[in-house]
């Protein structure tokens, strides 16, 4: 697993639940006191152990932990960079949804060894979509769901997101109102 | 059905369609005045441009300066470098094509590398770029690369700190904080390579075993630390003081070429080491034997030879009784 993802999990735990929480999780998972380095690679099994330790520590189901992580990644004040990169996807939430097919490719442009979930958006009638994720880890969908929830807020769109029963890698999206709220400001150029 | 070749056929596009395909185009009439300007050029060019003469709004610099529409048309299809009067520091790429039947020209511009600066200064949005324009991907890349480079810099700083720590540990004797054998070998090799004069002192404690045996290792460690402190006090920062064995020390004196001084320093060190050292309510008593030599005793000093001679001189001191100083006279 790429260090960026492991490092994100570490920052999520530290920023949301505090440094002592991270120390407990790291200890239980066998992560050294120096924590994760964003630019190194780690074994997938280590990431699994961290998530196991985290869900045990928080006493929450894995999917809920991952969704919170996804939301944190784009909405926490220290994570402004990722939010901005995602906003490059489009002017509206609809355009953003369609840009998700490019997400993994864009990430590879910046960091060639970074392997993000391959996403495919399938449009149905009436503002309904299915987002299909494919990844080498089985937990892409809940993570992406958290990201989508936060990005909908960011654009000021009102959406309904549900996991598809029987298809754990599918997310059902219903776009109810793309201009529901003001949304957060975004300028192409950095202030 | 056969599709006729497109060459020579003319299509009509509305201003809106042109705007969408080329948000940075200028449509010029046969007199060289602007008929219509794309949305992005209007943003960059400072508002309404229609009706104004081309040379008032922009300047074509390459491949050669252009003063009229006729001159621009001679460059039909070539790669142009263009500046806008409203933003003369930004360099644009451009190309012009002539319109049919002497109807003027269309000049299309691109931000090129000025894109990063321009989006901030003119508050451009995604709508200012045609969906086929790769400029947005470039902005995205610039921002992503900047973030990645920041991470690399952070990693580098951390690794560099760790390297400096490791290097320091690799040349330090942990008990006394003095240099170790490896550091001494390095310092001596440097001195020899630079052909600087130096003095070398090999010191071995007397009665140290008794302190260790009767008062314990903690007392022994305390004595070694005290010896280290005294050696540092009796030398200068340019000198190298090292512990190279249990109770053996090597001191390298930078620039020393005076046998009498070397002997005097050695005697002073012994005198100080012989003062009883208080430890845990008792007094530890040690002394030292010293063998020393000077690089000036040798035609061509050699690290191994100098070390061997200092060691032999130390052996001679031990042989003479305790607390002695012997000088190896070298010779080739």
Image (tube, grey):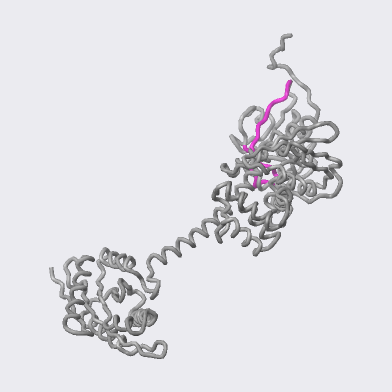
Q: Is residue B59 visible?
A: no
Would residue B162 appear left or right of A141 to someone viewing this image?
left
Q: A129 above or below B151? A: above
Identify the residue at horizontal 67%, vertical 30% (top origin): B96
User: Residue farthest to the top?
Assistant: B1
State the image quarter where residue A126 is shown: top right
Q: Is residue A104 magenta?
A: no
- The range drawn in magenta is B81-100
**Quarter of image, res A105:** top right
Left or right for B175, reference B274: right
Q: Main secondary structure of the magenta part?
A: strand
- Identified at 38% across, 76% down, the residue is B176
- The x and y percentages for residue B89 are 64, 47
In which quadrant is the N terminus of chain B drawn? top right
What residue is shown at x 72% (from left), y 53% (from top)?
A72
- Residue A174, given in percent of the width and then of the height, sits at 83, 39
Q: Position of residue B307 (x, y in %)?
A: 22, 69
Is residue B55 positioned above or below B149 on the image?
above
Query: Would you say A157 lies left or right of B5 here?
Result: right
- Say if A144 sits above or below B76 in the image: below
Residue B301 in view, yes or no: yes
Image x and y of residue B78, in percent: 61, 30
Above or below residue A9? Residue A134 is above
Quadrant of the image for the C terminus of chain B?
A: bottom left
The residue most toward the left is B332
**Residue in the picture at 66% in, 55% down:** A54
Is residue B85 on the magenta stretch?
yes
């Amino acid at each position: 697993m790429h260090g960026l993802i492991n490092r994100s999990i570490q920052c999520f735990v530290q920023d949301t639940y505090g440094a002592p929480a991270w120390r407990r999780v790291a200890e239980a998972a066998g992560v050294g006191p120096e924590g994760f380095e964003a630019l190194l690679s780690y074994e997938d099994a280590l990431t699994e152990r961290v998530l196991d330790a985290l869900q045990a520590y928080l006493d929450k189901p894995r999917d809920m932990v991952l969704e919170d992580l996804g939301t944190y990644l784009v909405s926490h004040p220290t994570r402004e960079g990722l939010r901005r990169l995602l906003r490059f996807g489009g002017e509206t939430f609809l355009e953003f949804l369609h840009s998700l097919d490019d997400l993994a490719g864009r990430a590879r442009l910046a960091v060639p060894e970074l392997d993000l979930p391959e996403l495919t958006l399938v449009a149905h009638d009436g503002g309904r979509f299915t987002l299909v994720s494919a990844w080498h880890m089985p937990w892409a969908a809940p993570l992406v769901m958290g990201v989508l929830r936060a990005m909908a807020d960011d654009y000021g769109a009102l959406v309904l997101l549900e996991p598809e029963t029987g298809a754990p890698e599918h997310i059902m999206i219903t776009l109810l109102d793309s201009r529901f709220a003001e949304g957060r400001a975004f300028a192409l150029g950095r202030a | 059905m056969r599709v006729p070749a497109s060459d020579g056929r003319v299509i009509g596009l509305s201003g809106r369609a042109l705007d969408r395909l080329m948000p940075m185009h200028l449509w010029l009439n046969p007199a060289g005045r602007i008929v219509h300007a794309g949305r992005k050029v209007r943003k960059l060019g400072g508002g309404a441009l229609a009706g104004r003469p081309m040379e008032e709004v922009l300047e074509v610099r390459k491949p050669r300066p252009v003063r009229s529409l006729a001159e621009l048309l001679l460059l039909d299809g070539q790669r142009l470098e263009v500046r806008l009067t409203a933003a003369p520091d930004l360099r644009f790429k451009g190309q012009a094509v002539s319109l049919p039947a002497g109807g003027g020209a269309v000049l299309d511009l691109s931000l090129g590398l000025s894109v990063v600066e321009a989006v901030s200064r003119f508050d451009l949005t995604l709508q200012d770029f045609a969906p086929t324009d790769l400029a947005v991907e470039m902005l995205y890349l610039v921002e992503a690369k900047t973030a990645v480079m920041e991470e690399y810099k952070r990693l580098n700083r951390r690794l560099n700190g760790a390297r400096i720590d490791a290097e320091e540990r690799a040349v330090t004797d942990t008990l006394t904080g003095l240099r170790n054998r490896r550091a001494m070998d390095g310092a001596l090799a440097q001195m020899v390579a630079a052909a600087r004069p130096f003095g070398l002192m090999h010191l071995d404690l007397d009665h140290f075993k008794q302190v260790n045996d009767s008062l314990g290792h903690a007392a022994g460690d305390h004595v070694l630390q005290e010896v280290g402190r005294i050696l540092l006090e009796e030398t200068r920062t340019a000198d190298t003081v090292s512990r190279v064995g249990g109770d053996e020390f090597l001191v390298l004196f930078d620039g020393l070429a005076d046998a009498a001084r070397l002997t005097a320093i050695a005697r002073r060190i012994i005198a100080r080491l012989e003062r009883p050292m208080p430890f845990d309510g008792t007094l530890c008593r040690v002394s030292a034997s010293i063998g020393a030599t000077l690089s000036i005793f040798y035609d061509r000093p050699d690290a191994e030879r100098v070390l061997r001679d200092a060691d032999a001189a130390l052996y001679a001191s031990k042989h003479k009784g305790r607390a002695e100083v012997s000088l190896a006279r070298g010779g080739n």
